[in-house]
Amino acid sequence: MADELHGKRIAILAADGVERVELEQPRQALQDAGATTELLSLHEGEIKARENDLDEAGTFPVDAVVKSASADDYDALLLPGGTVNPDQLRTDTDAVGFVRDVMVAGRPVAAICHGPWTLIEAGVVEGRTLTSYPSIRTDLRNAGANVVDEEVARDGNLITSRSPEDLPAFCAAMVELFSQAK
């Protein structure tokens, strides 16, 4: 069971303000399952993490800039939350285009907390069932999504989750979904 993602290359798209635990725990679950993960961001160097959106929580080294990334190079995509992180991503045309390309290609995507904001901007939530942090559910509805209040919502190649409290269920569902990537 610890090798179900062997040979899979997973993109993690995040920017400054990422909620530390929402990047760290899913990435560890992916690596424990044998995946190779690459942190993509808007700039080179490091991104600053937060705890509960307010407190500084260290940094993460960036592996590549999303501007030069191709959806074809990855088997799946993880979108961690935090409020500031997806707010930055959804205003960056390269990040939005990358997310759209991954979704259009039918690759698995996992988004937690405020992560679905970038999915909204990419125009890929209409008619899909998602969950999220409560404060962005109206945004999801306005974009045409069917919103549920569950720890994990799965709709085809997309899973979403509400908050850090749901991380155990989210990580398990993400590994299962990503293991099905072709």
Image (spheres, rainbow, N blue to C red):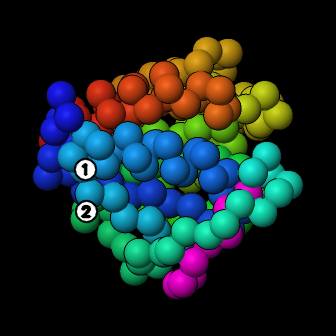
Q: Main secondary structure of the magenta part?
A: strand
Q: Which residue is mark 2?
A: 72
The crowd level at tag 2 (other Cα within 10 Å; few <14, some 14-19, many 20+) is: few
| Picture disc at residue 163 | none
Please indicate, yes or no, whether residue 133 appears anywhere in the rendered image. yes
Q: Is residue 144 left or right of residue 175?
A: right
Vertical relation: 180 (above or below) 32? above
**Is 9 located above or below residue 15 in the figure?**
above
**What is the span of residues highlighted in magenta in the rendered image?**
43-50
Residue at point 52% right, 84% down?
44
Residue 110: x and y in percent read: 46, 39
Please say if 24 is above or below 66: above
Quarter residue 17 falls in: bottom right
Residue 155 position, x and y percent, is: 44, 24
Q: Say whether disc 2 or disc 1 marks the residue closer to the N-terminus.
A: 1
**Which structural element holds mark 2?**
helix
Residue, x 20% and y 51% (percent of image)? 8
Residue beneath the point at 33% across and 58% down: 37
Residue at the disc numbered 1? 35
In front: mark 2 or mark 1? Answer: 1
Tell me which residue sits at (37%, 64%) in the image. 38
Q: Position of residue 28 (x, y in %)?
A: 40, 47
Q: Amino acid at mark 1?
A: Ala
